[in-house]
Amino acid sequence: LSVSSSSPSVVTGHKVVVVVCHSSLAQTLPPEEAPVDRPFWGVDDPSMPLPFDLADIINRVESLLWRM
């Protein structure tokens, strides 16, 4: 893994840090199967939204548990 830091965003004023996977296996995957680089933020900026719908993930996990 490597971490790259971009300059502060003009729109939000937040500094965005992207963690990039440099796994040789991940680099051989076609673009539609490659890992998605997501922005990272710390506890000093809790207002940034999650890059995914956590409620949807929780609902899916709960439905899987009910099937067991």
Image (spheres, grey):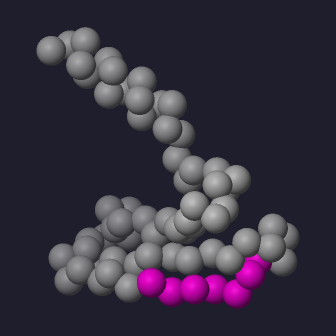
Residue reaching furthest to the right: 11
Q: Residue 8 magenta-drawn?
A: yes
- Looking at the image, residue 63 lies above or below residue 16: above
The quadrant holding residue 33 is bottom left
Q: Residue furthest front?
A: 44
Which of the 4 image quarters holds residue 27? bottom left
Q: Which residues are magenta?
A: 3-9
Residue 28 is at least partly visible in this image: no
Front residue of this view, candidates 44 and 63: 44
The picture places residue 31, in percent across and down from the top left corner, at 38, 70
Q: Classify residue 24 as left or right of residue 53.
A: left
Residue 50 in the image: x percent, y percent? 57, 50
Is 31 on the left or on the right of 64, as rendered? right
The quadrant of the rendering that contains the N terminus is bottom left
Q: Residue at position x 23%, y 80% from top? A: 23
Q: Residue 30 in the image: x percent, y percent?
A: 31, 70
Q: Which residue is found at the position 73% from the left and 72% from the top? A: 14
- Identify the residue at horizontal 63%, vertical 86% (top origin): 6
Q: How many marks?
A: 0
Residue at image location 33% in from the left, 21% down from the top? 62
> Which quarter of the rendered picture does the C terminus lie within?
top left
The answer to which quarter of the image holds residue 41 is bottom right
Camera sees residue 10: yes
Horizontal and vertical percent position of residue 65? 24, 19
36 left or right of 53 in image: left
